[in-house]
Image (cartoon, grey):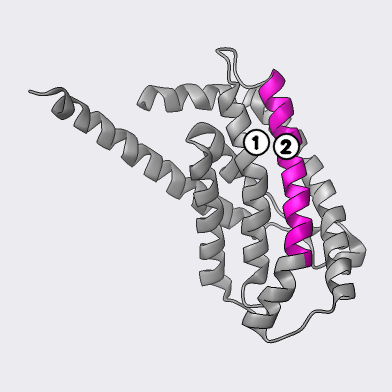
Amino acid sequence: MTTTNLQTPRTSRVRLFRLSVTALLSALGFILMFIEFPLLPMFAYLKMDFSDLPAILGGVLLGPVYGVIIELVKNLLDLLFKGFGSQMGFGNFQNFLVGSAFVLPLSICLRRFVTPEGYGGKGLALGCGLGSLSLLAVGFLSNLLVAPLYFRFFVGETIPLSGALTAAGAASLFNVIKGAILVVIVLAGARFALPPLKKMVDKVR
């Protein structure tokens, strides 16, 4: 029996495990999208939810690409359930962009600097810092540059520059608060939740 044949069952088991966990976390993210609340009374349409947490978990434990996939799948499920609405799914598009912008650098840094003791130190500080900056940058630029193009081609509406600037400013303030909340949760999770979950995932590899 060749080495390739010996590795095939193990490889299949790992792929099935990753696929199952990705599907489970995507479904959890979709459910968490229903638990939302406004952070800024003057911009009530900007609502906070915790649907990025499963994507963060998947990105850290399985790999950054899996975190982005979870962000994509949860938003596709939300579109299928709620429909495109008057904005032709722009909210979901934004959710995917901003969520991925936070998950990617965070999961890359945490996985790069993981130690036998767990996630912490340099990786945690760098990941939270880069994730927050990426979240703010993508949120601002997507509202300022992407939103006018999206609404013009998919909704048939023209957004003036003043409106785009107002939306980008509101999104920036919202994302500062959202990023801070996510960072606090990540800091707590990196200490208490991620280490035992990592051990469970490592056993399957």
Residue at (44, 49) in percent of width and height: 23
Q: Which residue is mark 2?
A: 130
Q: Main secondary structure of the magenta part?
A: helix
Q: Are marks 1 and 2 in contact (CB under 8 Å)?
A: yes
Measured along the vertical axis of the image, is residue 103 above or below residue 126? below
- Labels 1 and 2: the sequence-earlier one: 1
Identify the residue at the far top of this view: 116
Where is the C terminus found, in terms of image quarters?
top left
In this view of the protein, can residue 175 be seen by the observer? yes
Residue at (48, 21) in percent of width and height: 199
Q: Which residue is mark 1?
A: 106
Q: Where does the magenta region start and end?
A: 121-144
| Position of residue 166 measured from the top left corner of the image (x, y, whole percent) | 89, 68
Measured along the vertical axis of the image, is residue 90 above or below residue 50? below
Where is the N terminus found, in terms of image quarters?
top left
Q: Tell me the SS state at disc 1.
A: helix
Residue at (55, 69) in percent of width and height: 79
| Position of residue 43 measured from the top left corner of the image (x, y, whole percent) | 87, 66
| Position of residue 114 measured from the top left corner of the image (x, y, whole percent) | 58, 20
Identify the residue at the far left of this view: 1
**Disc 1 packing (10 Å; few <14; some 14–19; many ≥20):** many
